[in-house]
Amino acid sequence: MQLDDLLERIKAAHDDHVPLRIRGAGSKDFYGGMLAGEVFDVAPYAGILAYEPTELYITARCGTRLAEIEAELAGKGQMLAFEPPHFGAATLGGCIAAGLSGPRRMAAGGVRDFVLGAKLIDGTGQVLDFGGQVMKNVAGYDVSRLLAGSLGTLGLIAEATLKVLPRPVAEQTLCFDFDAAESIAKLNEWGGRPLPISASFWFANCLYLRLSGAQAAVDAAIRALAQAGGKPIAAVDAAKHWISVREQTHPAFAAATLWRCALPSTAPLSSDDSLQAIEWGGALRWYADAPDGLRSEAAVSGGHAVLYRAAESKRCLDGAFAPLSPALLALHRRLKKSFDPKGILNPGRLYAEF
Amino acid sequence: MTLSDSVFTTDRAALATRLKMILPAHCLLTEDEDLRPYECDGLTAYRELPMAVCLPESEVQVIDVLRTCHQMGVPVVARGAGTGLSGGAMPHAQGVVLSMARFNKILQVDRSARTAVVQPGVRNLAVSEAAAPFGLYYAPDPSSQIACTLGGNVAENSGGVHCLKYGLTVHNVLRVRVVSIEGEVFEIGSAAPDAPGYDLLALIIGSEGMLGVVTEVTVKLVPKPELAQVVMASFDEVARAGDAVAAIIAAGIIPAGLEMMDKPATAAVEPYVKAGYDLDAAAILLCESDGTPEEVAEEISRVTAVLTAAGARDIRVSQSEAERLRFWAGRKAAFPAVGRITPDYYCMDGTIPRKRLAEMLAAIAAMESKYQLRCANVFHAGDGNLHPLIMYDAAKPGEWARAEAFGAEILELSVALGGSITGEHGVGIEKINQMCVQYSAPALDAFRRIKAAFDDKGLLNPGKAIPSLHRCAEYGCMHVHRGDLKFPELERF
Ligand SMILES: Cc1cc2nc3c(=O)[nH]c(=O)nc-3n(C[C@H](O)[C@H](O)[C@H](O)COP(=O)(O)OP(=O)(O)OC[C@H]3O[C@@H](n4cnc5c(N)ncnc54)[C@H](O)[C@@H]3O)c2cc1C
Ligand SMILES: Cc1cc2nc3c(=O)[nH]c(=O)nc-3n(C[C@H](O)[C@H](O)[C@H](O)COP(=O)(O)OP(=O)(O)OC[C@H]3O[C@@H](n4cnc5c(N)ncnc54)[C@H](O)[C@@H]3O)c2cc1C
């Protein structure tokens, strides 16, 4: 598949007013609002275009599988530091459009923090290049990062450049017998100390804490955390554990209806037994079949709740994402219109209104 | 440089009358002698007197000023400390300067959540000072941090020595409150790790005051490392120093700071600060490591090994905090030091892929003879962000014009080498023509549509950062993509 093929398809859809549903591997069909339009399969537009280990970037076409990118990086001792899930065949374009990150997000940053540049095809079929391949570029508005989490509503991400980082030399996971509230308190306390914490996960009264960095730093942290009752976990089990968290094959994610709450890490915990898991130093909390009012409770705490997984009818009825204020919604509409004047790209996938 | 792309006609008396109705007397300046201090920012080559300077003390006053200007069709330029180096805060002759200097309160420091809520007029360093009792600090540290404000940092997406490891402003701001030109208040981002909808935070940060006026910022604070130590290495060839930088990264090390100075820069600096720099070296590298004492010891020994293998002629490791600060003092004082040996200097700010460093420096040396001006180079080697300091004398006819052309050529070469015309100082008025070189016409058009989505009358900081189509055509650098040109029927220059 060539760039021109992508272009032509969008141009035609624009001319004929046909909505398109951009699809990478389709591993995310469960996520977001309604799925509308003709399926536009962009997975064949694949391949790594440039990888410069000493410049810390990789550029690839949107259909490139994350697995392929990560294998390439691993060969040079590097990684995608936001640890995106592969879930089978997930693609680079889908990863950026979905904007979700894995266990290392609290320590290293999310997808948006690693996007350096993007080649975008807007809703009229024009190719737009934003950002680039250098670490620092403040010329013009930062549209590449705006695309993270836009769910394909602003344009087709045809190619993208991501910043990469060296893999840590040493890694060790500890386990603590803490309940949810105690875990949140401890995570916030430890977060204020110079400890090399790279991931945290609470489930069923057990707090897993991953330490990554120089061997000396990890060893020193283990000694410092021994008093709190941290028990080391064998490396093989730890690796399996973090993959199950990243890929959401862990039992904590098994519920048919799953809510994702992003909150300030210190937000008080509502004593609700539908709480499934806590990630990201206390800032990401997962609920199953949440009680009414979860969304407003999250908003009061300064965060938001996403109906992450549910029957499509329920997602469309309640909205997968927390509603925007009228002023912000109007701004979103104007932005959407500026990239996709006829509203043909993934209509309704982010918000029913556009 | 005139702002031909942004023509406004403001009735000065009517404007003053309206502003007097909404601001107390001590918050409004309208006399020429009072306006003079605001005529430029850190880029003093470009000056303009505004019609009025507003110094609001509350968000309500900001809203009122913006509403008034929106109704009257008057341009507004927000201003922090005025340390910007690209003319971003240079006033508009027909407009108002909205100084946020009185928004100078730190509203909250939350030790447990590791966040601070501050007003935009708070100085960058003041945030770290307020967080210090908790063992925390604010990571982005522009060299101007004792003076520049958070509002300016947000508008410019400022970075500093630590940004290779700790990121730029965009990686360290969680939430901003913004007032639109229509006087509407937006909350963008939140204290949670993400927010619903588009990542507008990414759009606002680095938007150079063109999308809205920031009235409050929530920043992330990070734990202060227990120890920092710096390795100073000198090299006989600039290219070797560049290769050494790549070798450090290839070894899997991301230093807390990685800076380079060439011979003219060390020659200017050493007599001024007596940092102990090797004056015979073609270039020196400063590489900082931070973390726990164990971590630092491990990293320093690895860095030292890499630098030795890369052919450093001399390597020194700071043995005390005083010595570490002395090693840095020279780098930090590079600008004023160059200021002592030349009447004027022009500081550029391009980024390039690191591997093109030697090529760029050779090209700059050639430009020195072409333009008959000297140039010293200091840069953030870790992320390829160069700051060539072009020395000139404004009093000598033609020198400023040559310096300007010299700078433009460096920026255009940065783009040709795969980089950007600005790594941290912004486009402002200074690099607006080079935007036409870096971006294609459709991308520039997308920027203009984004601008219109926030500010349909184009009143916020007009003439800056995003060039008009007309301007690019005048500059002769119009990129035509696939023959896809807006208004193809119109004549071009
Ligand atoms: C049960 C399950 C749980 C998962 N949990 C997580 C999780 O918690 N976190 C996480 O990050 N991932 C999760 N994933 C993995 C998810 O697949 C990844 O986020 C992946 O990166 C999406 O890629 P994709 O190619 O499959 O995207 P798709 O599902 O094909 O598309 C996702 C979105 O991106 C848009 N899109 C795709 N390609 C482009 C493009 N080139 N340009 C513009 N828009 C595009 C689509 O229109 C759609 O809106 C999960 C997957 C499953 C099945
Ligand atoms: C000696 C020296 C060293 C420097 N070193 C660095 C460095 O290492 N790294 C770096 O990144 N920069 C550096 N700079 C540049 C400058 O300090 C930064 O760009 C800084 O962020 C500007 O902040 P300010 O408060 O002075 O903003 P100003 O110069 O007042 O304004 C800059 C821009 O921000 C806008 N603005 C200001 N406040 C607001 C607000 N509240 N809402 C919306 N827009 C607003 C203005 O309109 C303008 O476009 C240096 C400058 C000097 C003089």
Image (cartoon, helix red, strand yellow):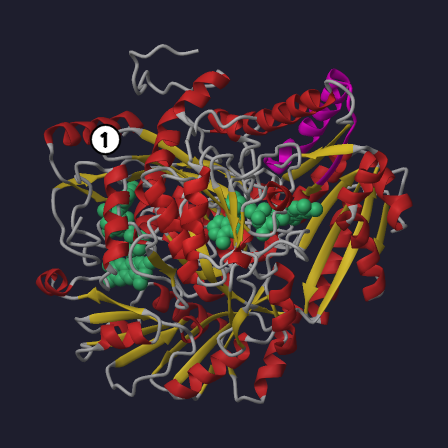
Q: Is residue B28 above or below residue A188?
A: above
Residue A219 found in image quarter? bottom right
User: Residue A88, how many percent across, how many down?
Assistant: 29, 54
Q: Is residue B141 above or below residue B468?
A: below
* Chain bearing mark 1: A
Q: Residues within 10 Å of mark 1 (few under 14, many from 20)?
A: many
Q: Which residues are magenta?
A: B350-378
Viewport quadrant of the N terminus of chain A: top left
User: Residue A305, how many percent across, how many down?
Assistant: 27, 69
Along the line of sight, which residue is nearer the eye, B382 or A338?
Answer: A338
Residue B235 in magenta? no
The residue drawn where x is 31% and y is 19% is B484
Residue B364 in magenta? yes
Q: Amino acid at mark 1?
A: Thr
The residue drawn where x is 43% and y is 59% is B61
Along the line of sight, which residue is nearer the eye, B22 or B314?
Answer: B22
Residue B336 found in image quarter? top right
User: Residue A17, how many percent across, how many down?
Assistant: 11, 33
The residue drawn where x is 39% and y is 30% is B444
Residue under label 1: A124
Q: Is residue B98 visible?
A: yes
